[in-house]
Amino acid sequence: MKTAIIYMSKHGSTEKMVEMLKNKLINSEIDVINLKKKKSPDISKYENIIIGGSIHVGTIQKKITKLIEKNMNILLHKKIALFLCCMYEYEKRIEQFNNSFPEDLRNHSSANGLFGGEFVFEKMNFLEKTIVKKVSEYSSTVSKIDEKAIDEFVGKFQK
């Protein structure tokens, strides 16, 4: 089975989680597609599609949203899974997940994952650092990657 992991990463944290995800998947030929490098991938050739991104200024990256809008009919006829990387916990991260992916796609998805996130201050510009400091309790680099959530996601996806 051919699987595509399609993602967007601004500072590399989502890319790190995609690599962890890829290494946990078995019995599949996997193509990893970074929308930063490949703007409009042909998803029709894949049997399985995993889509994910991260939250920046309250929303998922526009390239993820555009990919989904453009390919919704194809996605609803494939085995898909969705994930989000974000630093919020509990209800707020569920709200962000629901706001990031259309309801039809969430309901069709075989696995939905919330993988945690990171604030990597060394990779942020001044404005990003200022915003993060203002809206969070963090003022330096912190990682809250949830490897257990990635494992559970893989288990659901591979059923």
Image (cartoon, rainbow, N blue to C red):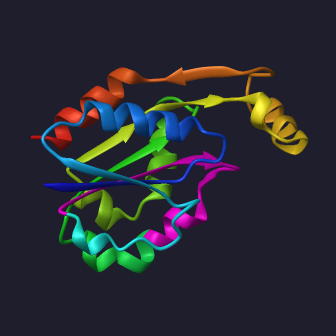
Q: Residue at x 70, y 50 (%)?
A: 57
Question: Is any atom of residue 86 visible in this view?
Answer: no
Q: Residue at x 88, y 44 (%)?
A: 127
Span highlighted in magenta in the image = 47-67
Look at the image and say whether residue 55 sits in the magenta stretch.
yes
Look at the image and say whether residue 122 sits in the magenta stretch.
no
Residue 58: give x, y in percent of width and height.
65, 50
Quadrant of the image containing the N terminus: bottom left
Quadrant of the image containing the C terminus: top left
Is 69 or 24 nearer to us in this picture? Answer: 24
Marks counted in the figure total: 0
Residue 62: give x, y in percent of width and height.
59, 65
Q: Is residue 87 left or right of residue 52?
A: right
Q: Residue at x 35, y 63 (%)?
A: 103
Q: Is residue 158 left or right of residue 135?
A: left
Residue found at the far left of this picture:
159
Q: Residue at x 61, y 29 (%)?
A: 118
Q: Is residue 157 above or below residue 39?
A: above
Displayed quadrant of residue 42: bottom left
Residue 102: give x, y in percent of width and height.
40, 65
